[in-house]
Amino acid sequence: MSTFSLIWANLFRNPTRTSLTVLSVVVAFMLFMLLRAIAAAFAGGVDLAGVDRLVVSGKYSAIDSLPISHVRQIQAIEGVDLATHQHWFGGIYQDPRKFFPKHPVPPETYFEVFDELIIEPDVLARFAATRVGALATVSLAERFGWKPGDIIPILGDIWVKEDGSRLWEFELVGTYAYPPERSGGDEFLLQYEYFTESVIDHGKDAVGWITVRVSDTDRANEIAGTIDKLFENSADATRTATEDQFRRQFAAQLGDMGFITTMILTAVFFTIVLLTANTMTQALRERIPELAVLKTLGFTDSAVSLLVLGEALMLCLIGGVVGVILALFLEPGLNAQAVAFIGNFEMTPLTITSAIGLSVLVGLIVGAVPAVTAKRLTIVDALRQR
Amino acid sequence: MTALVNCRNVEKSFTKGKQTVEVLAGINLSIEEGDFLALMGPSGSGKTTLLNLIGGLDHPTGGEIEVNGKNLNALSSKALARWRSENIGFIFQFYNLLPVLTAQRNVELPLLLTKLTRGQRKKNAATALEIVGLADRGKHKPGELSGGQQQRVAIARALVADPKLLVCDEPTGDLDRDTADEILDLLQTLNAEHGKTIVVVTHDPKAADHARHTLYMDKGKLAEAVSM
C-alpha cells in the first residue's frame, strides 16, 4: 500500500456520492473547455495577410445592410478580382427550432467567388434560370428529405413581401456541398433577384455583406483599407475583415462573448466549489474517529491534513482530466457545427493547461477547510466521537 | 527488570465551561519491561485517561511521564507522533480499523511512516497477521470479518512496527466471552513469548486474570495493587 492508495481508498468510501460529485466536476470542466474555446474563437486577432477573400460589412454592426451599389464600386477597385454578396434572410421552416441559415445570393458570382463549393454545372444553371429557385447543402436536403422539384415554404420573420404576405415559396433545384476539409453545415441559398424584387420596399437593393476575392493575396491589407476608405464618409461606412473575423462579428451580436462565458463559468464553478466542499465536509465528519486513529498510529497533524487535502485534490483532478478528455472527444463534432458561425473552434494547449490548473485550484479551495479541521483534531476528543 | 514506564505525580484535569474537573490526582506508577498490567476500576475513575497519557495521546496537566527513557512532556506534537509510531501499539475496544482498507492494508498502515520498501511493508504485515492467526484473511475488509477477527487485525496492526509497549483500552469490551478469552490468550502469548509489555484497561475480571499485575483506580487515584 502507498499513501496514494490510502487517499484513493478513502475517496471512494461512498462510491455513489463520490461518483456523483466527480460527475458534476466533469460536466463543469467540459463546460469550461467548450466555453473557453468559444471565447478564444471570438477573441482571436485579425490577420489579413495571405487571405484571398475579404468580407465587407457595415462598419458599426454586422447586421446593418449595405446598398447593392457598394458591390459595383468595390468591383471597380484595382486589385479586386470579383465581388459577390449575401444577405441574412432569417425565416422559419416548419418550426423555429429547425433553424438553418438562408441567404439570398447572385448565382453567377457567388459560386465563382466561393469556388471551393461543389455543385454540378447543370444544377447551377437551373438555379440561375429559376426565379424562385433555391439550393440546399446536401446535409440540409438529407435532414428534411428534400428532393429537386420540392416546394420549400419559408415564413418570413424579418422580410415581408411587397404584398404583405410573409409566405415565401422556393423551388429546390438541386444541392451543393462544402469540400470535406471545410465543413459548412446546413445552408439554403435563394435567388437574390427574386428576393430584392419581391421584398417590401425597405429591403430592396440592399445586401447583408459583400465577399471580395482579391487578385493578389499580398495586397489584402491594402485592398481592405482602400474599400473602407472609399465608403468612409458615406452613410453606409464599411468594415473589411477576413471571413473568420466576420463570422465572429456576426455571432457576437449575441453580446460580449468573453463576458458571457466568464459569467457562466463563474456561476458553474461557484456551484461546483459549494457542492464539492459539501461532499468533502460530509466525508470528513463521517470519519473523524478514523483520522484520530491515524494520528494515534503516528501520522502527524500535517500528514493527516495533507491526506484530506489530497482527497479533495484527487477528486477535482479526476473530474478535471475526464472533463478535458470528453471535451476533446467532442471537439471535432462541435467544430463542424460551430465553424459556420464563429470560425475555428479549437481547444488549445493553453485551454487544457488552464483547465487542469483550475481543477487543482478548486481542489485546494474545497479541501482547505476540511484539511484545517483535520489538522486541529485532538486525538482523545476525536476518538470519543465513535 | 527495568521500568519501561514511569509516572511521577501525574495530574490531569479538564475544563468544562467554568468548571475544572480533576481526572487524575497525582499518579505515581512504574511499569516494568515485560509486565502485563491490568488497570481496573469504575467508569470515570481515570483509567483511560492514564492509558492515553502513557501512550502519548495526551499531555498531563502536571507531573512527568517517562516511557522507554523518553520524557513525554518534553516532546512536541510532531515529535510525539513519531515517538508513538516507533514505541507504542494501540488496541481499542471498537477495533478502530479503517473500513475502506483490507486487513492486510490496515496492518500495513503504521509502516507507511517508516522507510521500509513496499515489499518489506507487505511482508511485515503478513507476518503480523500470521502471528494473530489471520494469515488467510488479509484480503478481507473489516466489514467481512467477525468482531474477534477484527480485534486480531487491530492487534496485528499494533504489533507490526514492533513496539515495546502495547496499550489496550477495553480490548474485550465488545466481544462475547469465548472470543474475549481468545483475545486475552493472544495478548498473554504476546507478553510471554514476544516480550511485549502490555497495559490493559478493562472492566472484565477475566481480563485481569490473564495479567501479571492488576491495579485498581478510583476517583483519579491508584487504589490498590495486586500481584498475581
Image (cartoon, helix red, strand yellow):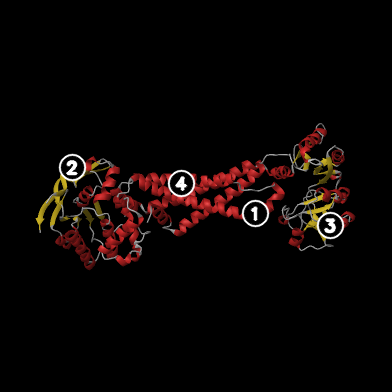
Mark 3 or 2, which is nearer the eye? 2
The residues tagged by marks 3 and 4 sit, at their Cα atoms, a distance apart of: 58 Å
In front here: A66 or A84? A84
In the rendered structure, the residue with mark 1 lies on which chain?
A
Residue corresponding to mark 4:
A366
Say which amino acid is labelled 3. Answer: Phe
The residues tagged by marks 1 and 2 sit, at their Cα atoms, a distance apart of: 71 Å
Say which amino acid is labelled 2. Answer: Glu
In the rendered structure, the residue with mark 4 lies on which chain?
A
Residue corresponding to mark 1:
A332
Q: How busy is the neighbourhood of tag 2: few (under 14 within 10 Å), some, or many (20 plus)?
A: many
Q: Secondary structure at mark 2?
A: strand
In the rendered structure, the residue with mark 3 lies on which chain?
A
The residues tagged by marks 2 and 4 sit, at their Cα atoms, a distance apart of: 41 Å
The residues tagged by marks 3 and 2 sit, at their Cα atoms, a distance apart of: 100 Å
Q: Quadrant of residue A42?
A: top right
Residue A3 image position (x, y, % from top left): 38, 52
In front here: B84 or B113? B113
Q: Is residue A102 left or right of residue A42?
A: right
Q: How busy is the neighbourhood of tag 4: few (under 14 within 10 Å), some, or many (20 plus)?
A: many
N-terminal of the pair, mark 3 or mark 4, is 3
Residue A212 image position (x, y, % from top left): 81, 43
Q: Can residue A243 be seen from the camera position used here?
A: yes
In the drawing, what numbered circle is on residue B64? 2
Residue corresponding to mark 3:
A170
Say which amino acid is labelled 4. Answer: Val
